[in-house]
Image (spheres, grey):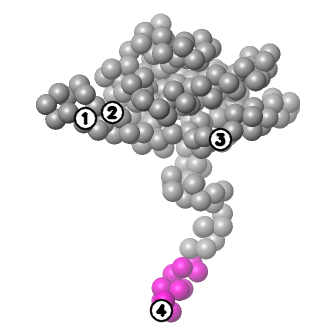
Amino acid sequence: MNRRAFCLLLGTLPALASATSAHDLLIGGVRDIRPRYLLVGPQGSAVSNEDFRGRFQLIAFGYTFCPDICPTTLLEMAEILKLLGEDARQLQGIFISVDPERDTPASLATYTGFFDPRIVGLTGSPALVQAAARNFKVRYAKVARDAGDPNLYAVDHSAGLYLLGPDSRFIKKYGYGTSTQLITDELRDLFRQP
């Protein structure tokens, strides 16, 4: 390594040290998350992050045709709600679709209801979904499965759970596959804080 490259590397160390994790560096830093959304709920009415003030929000992005990541994430969310018992009243589980072309409010209500009826499915116009995903630094893209049929596609998307506080501020992102017990224990600690 030449001297110039070494000096450039040294200049980046403070930024690297200030990041909370290597994952944060890969996703652009969770500090940039703006925890705002305006979408459509199960009854067809507008729903925003402000509608759940006073409760924590645990949010996942995905879509109902997802073969593995989304069902696993929603099973974990349902398990967290179960483990919390009575404390689950302080938490709202939310599933935001990144496939607004196929996921209607009614289909999302049916889908999330399979996992736990307390989980709310949200969708909206492509522009509203894109705005919500951009605010949470979620990436997603259609991937065609059959060039002859435009309806046969998958959606590659970011995975994980986003936690908002009762004031609707971003608290933390849990990576995909984080232990449900760990999340539950952290939530209980947060619920006890004044």
Of the residues under marks 4 and 1, which one precedes in the sequence? 4
Give the amino acid at mark 1: Arg
User: Which residue carries the number 1 mark?
Assistant: 145
Residue 154 marker: 2
Q: Which residues are magenta?
A: 1-11
| Badge number at residue 2 | 4
Disc 4/disc 3 C-alpha distance (Å): 40 Å
User: Residue 185, percent across and down?
Assistant: 79, 35
The disc labelled 4 sits on which kind of residue? Asn
Magenta-colored segment: predominant secondary structure:
helix
Side (left or right) of 157 relative to 117: left
Label 2 or label 3, whichever comes before in sequence order: 2
Q: CA distance from mark 4 to mark 2?
A: 45 Å
3D distance between C-alphas at marks 2 and 3: 24 Å
| Label placed on residue 106 | none
Between disc 4 and disc 3, the foreground one is: 3
Badges 1 and 2: C-beta atoms under 8 Å apart?
Answer: yes
Name the element at disc 1.
loop
> Residue flagged by tag 3: what amino acid is it?
Thr
Q: Is residue 133 left or right of residue 192?
A: left
From the image, tell me which residue sits under label 3: 178
Mark 1: few/some/many CA within 10 Å (<14, 14-19, 20+): few
